[in-house]
Image (spheres, rainbow, N blue to C red):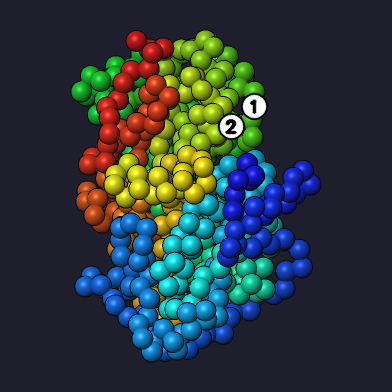
Amino acid sequence: MCDAAPIRCTDSHRSHTGHAPYVKELNMSDTPAPVRPRGVSRRNFVRGLTAAGAGGVVVGGASAWVMKPQGAAMSAAGGSGETVKIGSVAPITGPFSGDGLEMVRGAQMAVEEINAAGGVAGRPVELVTADISDQAPENFIQAAQRLVSQERVAAAFAGYTSTTSAEYKIYGDAGVPLLHTNTLQANTDFVVDNGITNIFQCCPTEIWYAEGFLQLIQDWIRTKAWTPRSNTVAIISSNDSYSISIAKVFQDGIKKIGWDVTLYDEVTAPNADWGPQLARIRANPPGLIFITDYLAGDLAGFATQFASAPTPSLLYQQYGPSVPEYLDLAKGAANGVLWSTTIGTLPDAMGLDFRDRYQKKYNAVPGLSQSGAQYDTVRLWARAAAQASDPYDFGAVSDFLKATIFRGVVGTYRFDEKELTAVPYPDKVDDPSLAMPHLTYQIQDGKQVLLSPSPYNKGTFALPAWIR
């Protein structure tokens, strides 16, 4: 999945060399101990702050994200001044590489636009990638050590982090801001419990998947958009803490509204054979099938195998259908499937503009989550670094991030002051200008149709053909 990426991907099976400017690949060997980079001069203060205190970053199209220092300031900074490195932690190889490709492409788009507008404090930005492949904890640790100690990055960005927060101490001790979208309550709890002040979860945690979908199905039942065959649910999770957390919260929540759980099962991802689970579902068809495995290939496989002999059950699959390969693999079997993400590119003017530019740049349709998320978080950091006037003044950068309200292509970023985690809309805050929208889609006629929330929704729920 890396052949078109602006990175160099290497493993024992492949080597791709479409290397774009300001992108560097790391290998994970020889990782010295963390050393915090020295600060640079604060004289390169970015002029032209917006009236809203945007720190030289404007929310909108592709230009002027970081305003150029003017006159002597530009000369002092040296338009070709010392490069500021930032790190992209992504699964470039392995089973998650489809999502990893989205992550690096989105981050690289942001870097190129920042540099075209004058850089950060007049300094160009370079994106360095670190491959975490199969997401083994040691891969995250090695990536963090390399980025912090050898590359001396000013910030790191990640779509995934380890479920145990194994790498967090490295970033915390060094002070290097880490902006991630791993959507895991355990990561948030680790930050709070350990008093970490520089790690930001740029999306709501996974618990909101369950609570948000529970609200939706109750709305559909109340309005008679859907009448379940029975108040029963089959829940299938992959056996990782993230997926299990969503499954357990949903299981507890749906029991509270009077439903029965007829099947609860856990599988090891990646999983290709859904025969055992489908046999039990077909023997006792539930009103709802709720799957929290998030691998696109796994979920496409389930949809395809389910479609060969479907039960009159609503089918929900968590997150994975946001990755482009899902529709490529599932094809017509995807029609009717429901899915959601707590961090997804919006189908509004900003989101559509981003998707159009992404497609023109990479000759590929972007996914609906990580490309936009990583694009946003790099720009979010750039604004804070510009406000701090020194991208290596980690304390100041983190303080500006904590105070930010930033509208990106996936919605509004505002961090809970204690958890440093994005607040969800409408699940927790009923104001889209102050919170990140929790998006729920249905695939209809091969297209992704956003059902919720308002004002971003573009369509309405439709009963799948296998239920009508």
Viewer-side residue, 251 vs 357? 357
Note whether residue 329 is visible: yes
Point 30% across, 25% down: residue:
461
Residue 466, quarter of picture: top left
Q: Quadrant of the C terminus?
A: top left
User: How far across and down, in percent of the image, does residue 261 sit?
Assistant: 44, 24
Viewed as shown, does residue 171 lie left or right of 380?
Answer: right
Viewer-side residue, 435 vs 214? 435
Point 30% across, 58% down: residue:
60
Viewed as shown, does residue 263 lie left or right of 6?
Answer: left
| Amino acid identity at mark 2 | Gly
Q: Secondary structure at mark 2?
A: helix
Sequence-wise, which precedes: disc 2 or disc 1?
1
Q: Secondary structure at mark 1?
A: loop
User: How far across and down, in percent of the image, does residue 348 sit?
Assistant: 29, 44
198 vs 343: above or below: below
Circle 2 crowding by C-alpha within 10 Å: few under 14, some 14–19, many from 20:
many
Circle 1 crowding by C-alpha within 10 Å: few under 14, some 14–19, many from 20:
some
Residue 228, quarter of picture: top left
Point 47% across, 39% down: residue:
365
| Amino acid identity at mark 1 | Ala
Pointers 2 and 1 in contact (CB under 8 A)?
A: yes
Point 38% across, 76% down: residue:
68
Give the mark toward the camera: 2 or 1.
2
**Furthest-right residue in view?**
12
Q: Quadrant of the N terminus?
A: top right
Viewed as shown, does residue 348 lie left or right of 181?
Answer: left
Residue under label 1? 272
Note whether residue 179 is visible: no
Viewer-side residue, 340 vs 232? 340
Q: Which mark is residue 297?
A: 2
26 vs 333: above or below: below
